[in-house]
Image: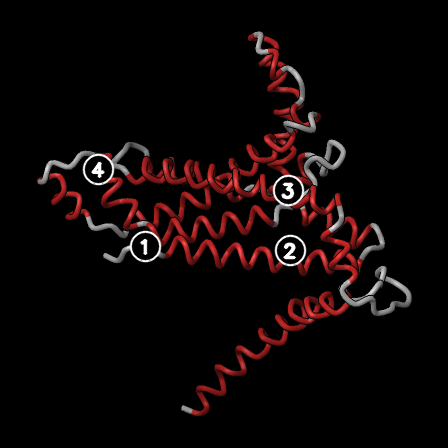
Amino acid sequence: MANRNRAFLMMTLPALLLFFTFHTYPVLQGFFYSFTDWKGYGEWNFVGFSNYLNVLQDVRALSAYGFTFQFAIVSTILVNIFSLMIALGLNAKIKFQKTLRALYFVPNILSILIVGFIFNFIFTHFLPEIAAAIGLNALTGNILGDPDLAWVGVVIMAVWQATAFNTILYLAGLQTIPEDIYEASKIDGAGKWRNFISITFPLIAPFFTINMVLAMKNFLMVFDHIIALTGGGPGQATESISLLIYRGGFQGGEFAYQSANAVIYFVVIVIISIFQLRVLQKREVEL
């Protein structure tokens, strides 16, 4: 037994060492430098909490926080609505069920950069040409070039790409519901809507919680969608927190300052995730 435990320990220690070296140590290092004025090179001095105080007064950082939260909240709601609707359809006894499930999962396996280039072409050329042909003047321009509408384009692309993964999770939840519950409710005369409100949605509540938390966390950390679609523009209209940290920290000589920004944002994401779990888990029911 002791030899077996030693073997399991030897298998897990390399993974732990790699995780600490390439994840935990850089995180601790970044936290340390957030209290300095290090630019990413050269000498540095301790500056206390001044980086944190400056982030809270930085107009560009606050604008990035505003855009990121707006994008994350809208995208999380839309993704969960669409993925639940698609999952309900794919869970029904319809023709070509397996083929449709495979097709709806395709966006999840595509590179976000490739998806971004495709949507860039759609918003820049395809959509304006279609709008001009049918006389829809409001969409004849490129929305990615409009500071007020560019975020809508990022939301559309992100929702299209992310819906596939959430659909898979909802499908897994729907298949855990025993069929005899629906048969019993049918005998009682319950309709489709009553079944969804009283049976389906309460019983997939744990999957709803997971989808909401994962979607919100992923959208709060949005980076590659914006790089592929707008680059943060026009101006800084679609600059997310992750993009601001990357540009300031690695391209702008603000390594310590953006490390403080990253620490603040990490705390914000943890608080939001815990809040979501506490609120959503209260409404979960067990079968």
Quadrant of the snapshot with the N terminus:
bottom left
Looking at the rendered structure, the secondary structure element under dot 4 is helix
Q: Residue at x 52, y 48 (%)?
A: 216
- Looking at the image, do the residues carrying marks 2 and 1 touch, with CB atoms under 8 Å apart? no
Q: Is residue 14 left or right of residue 254?
A: left
Q: CA distance from mark 2 to mark 4?
A: 41 Å
Amino acid type, label 1: Glu
- Residue highlighted by disc 1: 284
Q: CA distance from mark 4 to mark 3?
A: 38 Å
- Residue highlighted by disc 4: 194
Q: Nearer the viewer, residue 138 or 159?
A: 138
Mark 2: give few (<14), some (14-19) or many (20+) Cα within 10 Å. Answer: some
Can you give x and y, in whole percent of width and height, for residue 171 in the image?
Answer: 35, 46
Can you give x and y, in whole percent of width and height, for residue 119 in the image?
Answer: 61, 30
Mark 1: give few (<14), some (14-19) or many (20+) Cα within 10 Å. Answer: some
Which image quarter: residue 189? top left
Amino acid type, label 4: Arg
Amino acid type, label 2: Tyr
In this rendering, which labeled residue sits more in front, label 4 or label 3? 3
Q: CA distance from mark 2 to mark 3?
A: 12 Å
- Residue highlighted by disc 2: 265
Q: Residue at x 73, y 34 (%)?
A: 233
- Residue highlighted by disc 3: 66
